[in-house]
Amino acid sequence: MLATAFLVTCCAAFVSSTQHALAKRALLFQPFTILQFTYGVSAPALLPKRSINLSLCLQTNFELPNNISNFYPTVFTARENDDYDLDRHTFYEYVTEILNGLGLNGTDCLLRSICEIGEVPMHVDPDNSSVLEEIVHYLFSPSEDFVRIDNGTLGAYLDAEMWGKTFGKCNRRYDGCPLSVVSLFTKLFYV
C-alpha cells in the first residue's frame, strides 16, 4: 500500500512538472456533407365531419466543414453592394413586366393606374391614414420624388398623373388597358 502511494505521488509530480501542449483539433467531413434538422408541429383542427391537421414544419441545413480553412470566419466588407435602392423608373419597369405577363398591355395599364390615382388621390391623412394608403399614393404619384427626367422616359408617367389631375377620364385616354388595376384594391366613395 505504501509503495502504491509512493508511485502515485511520483507520477503526479512528474506529470505536473511537464508542460502539456494541446493542439486545436477539428473534425472534418467528406465534401458535400450536410447536417439537417427538421422540426414539425402538428395540431388537429376540430371541425364537424372533417379531419384536418394544421402543420408547421421548419427545416435547417448546415454544410459541414471539409477543409480546415472552413473554420476561419469569412470577412464581409461593409457596404460592399450599395445597389439596394430601387428607383421609381426600375419599379415601373417591373410592374410593366408583371402586367405584360398577365396578358395585359403593361405600359397602358401602369399609365392608367397612375392617371386614376392622380384623378382621385388616396385619402392620405397623417393622423388617420393607413400605411397601405401611403404606399399606394407614393408609388403611383411620380411627381412625389422625380428629380430627373431621362430622355423623356419618365415624362410619360408625369404626363399620366397630370392628365388625371386635370382632365380625368383615364379609361378613355389609356384604352389599351381593359381593366382598372387600381379598382382591384381600392373602392371609390362619393361624399
Image (cartoon, rainbow, N blue to C red):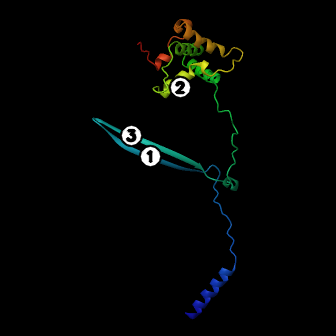
Position of residue 58 relative to residue 111, above or below, is below
Q: What kind of element bears circle 1?
A: strand
Q: Are marks 1 and 2 in contact (CB under 8 Å)?
A: no
Q: Earlier in the sequence, mark 1 or mark 2?
A: 1
Q: What kind of element bears circle 3?
A: strand
What residue is disc 2 on? 135
Residue 8 can be seen in this image: yes
The CA span between labels 1 and 2 is 36 Å
Look at label 2 and name its amino acid.
Answer: Ile
* Image point (64%, 25%), residue name: 87
Position of residue 148 relative to residue 55, above or below, is above
Label for residue 40? Answer: 1
Q: Are marks 3 and 1 in contact (CB under 8 Å)?
A: no
185 vs 20, left or right, is left
Q: Quadrant of residue 42?
A: top left
Query: Whole-percent x and y of residue 153?
Result: 68, 15
Q: What kind of element bears circle 2?
A: helix
The CA span between labels 2 and 3 is 33 Å
What residue is disc 3 on? 54
